[in-house]
Image: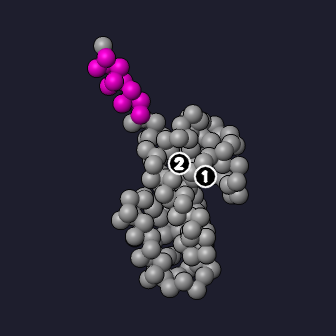
């Protein structure tokens, strides 16, 4: 699996513990991670908890444009390194009310954007790897079914 890591990603995952991954830096139009040759279908946005809060407050317009682009992909998710408990407790650098922050994230989910609160950086890397791996697996199954139907 060849994962494309956006050149603007400042703290990229290395995916060193996964045997099935090679990474390369490149342009990912939507998100921070995608798959080689499939950037038009899949994008994963990685956020620390502070980044997520910044994205829903002072960078909201830019973030919402990215979310809107993401809704046009087959798979788009925001994977946050923080947890729901961290969000609820306000363990981030912002004066945003934790209840407001939670409601904003819930609103994103209700509008169709997957927001996965992984709880740690290590778990977020596992989630990103898993999402991309399963996306490929499902696409392969689709292609095999189409080929079988075509005879």
Question: What's the magenta bit mostly, secondary-structure-wise?
Answer: helix
Q: Is residue 8 placed above or below 101 in the rendered structure?
A: above
Q: Is there a contact, CB below 8 Å, between mark 2 and mark 1?
A: yes
- Quarter of the picture containing the N terminus is top right
Q: Residue at x 71, y 58 (%)?
A: 10
Of residues 46 and 107, the one drawn nearer to the viewer in this rendering? 107
Span of residues in magenta = 139-150
Which residue, given by chain and number where applicable, does mark 2 sit on? 43
Residue reaching furthest top?
Answer: 151
Badge 1: how crowded within 10 Å, few (<14), some, or many (20+)?
Answer: many
Q: Residue at x 43, y 41 (%)?
A: 134
Q: Secondary structure at mark 2?
A: strand
Q: Residue at x 57, y 33 (%)?
A: 37
- Quarter of the picture containing the C terminus is top left
Quarter of the image for residue 36 reads top right
21 falls in the magenta region: no
Q: Earlier in the sequence, mark 2 or mark 1?
A: 1
Q: Which mark is residue 32?
A: 1
Q: CA distance from mark 2 to mark 1?
A: 7 Å
Of residues 44 and 17, the one drawn nearer to the viewer in this rendering? 44
Q: Is residue 25 placed above or below 90 in the rendered structure?
A: above
């Amino acid at each position: 699996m060849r994962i494309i890591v956006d050149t603007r990603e400042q703290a990229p995952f290395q995916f060193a513990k996964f045997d099935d991954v090679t990474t390369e830096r490149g342009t990912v139009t939507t998100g921070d991670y995608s798959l080689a040759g499939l950037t038009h279908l899949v994008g994963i946005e990685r956020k620390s908890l502070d980044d997520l809060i910044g994205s829903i407050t002072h960078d909201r317009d830019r973030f919402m444009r990215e979310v809107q682009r993401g809704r046009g992909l087959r798979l788009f998710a925001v994977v946050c390194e923080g947890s729901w408990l961290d969000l609820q407790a306000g363990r981030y650098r912002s004066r945003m009310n934790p209840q407001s922050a939670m409601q904003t994230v819930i609103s994103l989910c209700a509008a169709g954007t997957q927001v996965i609160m992984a709880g740690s950086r290590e778990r977020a890397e596992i989630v990103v790897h898993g999402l991309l791996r399963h996306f490929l697996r499902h696409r392969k199954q689709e292609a095999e079914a189409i080929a079988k139907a075509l005879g």
